[in-house]
Image (cartoon, helix red, strand yellow):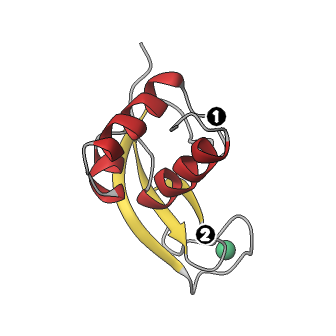
Amino acid sequence: MPKKKPYTFFWCRDCDQDFAVSTERKRIYCPLCGEHFYVEKVKDVWMERPFNYKRPWTPEEDEIVIVGRKQGYSYQEISDSLLARTPQSVRRRLQELKKKEVMA
Ligand SMILES: [Zn+2]
């Protein structure tokens, strides 16, 4: 079984994009704009392999987001119950789901 390694989750305010990096790095640059000024730490996570910040949402994750929102949880609280999802990505996912009228 692969060993889990620590990664730190960051979010670029400018690009509204979240991403994770190995915590050994000192200065963190956004993968989209290449800047570090707008990058904020979100949380530490443990993962078996490097994080793919554009990985698709699973039906299980969608379920947690939809049910959590219906029960009145904040994006922060919902992201806390998902591995490696930020409040920003939860918000974006909900907007996508609304467009598809899954929420209706
Ligand atoms: Zn950026």
Observer-nearest of 83 and 36: 83
Position of residue 27 measured from the top left corner of the image (x, y, whole percent): 53, 75
Q: Residue furthest top?
A: 1
Position of residue 7 measured from the top left corner of the image (x, y, whole percent): 43, 49
Observer-nearest of 104 and 14: 104
Residues at circles 2 and 1 in contact by the CB criterion of under 8 Å: no
- Picture mark count: 2
Badge 2 density bin: few <14, some 14–19, many ≥20, Cα 10 Å: few
- Name the residue: 26% across, 51% down: 73
Position of residue 12 measured from the top left corner of the image (x, y, whole percent): 57, 72
- Name the residue: 45% across, 31% down: 61
- Whichever of callouts 2 and 1 sits on the residue coming sooner in the sequence is 2
Q: Residue furthest front?
A: 104
Give above or below for 52 relative to 16. Answer: above
Q: Amino acid at mark 2?
A: Asp
- Name the residue: 36% across, 49% down: 79
Name the side, left or right, on which 81 lies relative to 97: left
Q: Quadrant of the N terminus?
A: top left
Quadrant location, ligand no. 1: bottom right
Q: Residue furthest bottom?
A: 37
Name the side, left or right, on which 38 lies relative to 76: right
Badge 1 density bin: few <14, some 14–19, many ≥20, Cα 10 Å: few
Q: Amino acid at mark 1?
A: Pro
- For residue 74, the mark is none
Q: Secondary structure at mark 2?
A: loop
Q: CA distance from mark 2 to mark 1?
A: 17 Å
Mark 2, residue position: 16
Give above or below for 23 relative to 83. Answer: below
Q: Secondary structure at mark 1?
A: loop
Residue 23 appears in the rendering = no
- For residue 56, the mark is 1
- Name the residue: 53% across, 32% down: 49
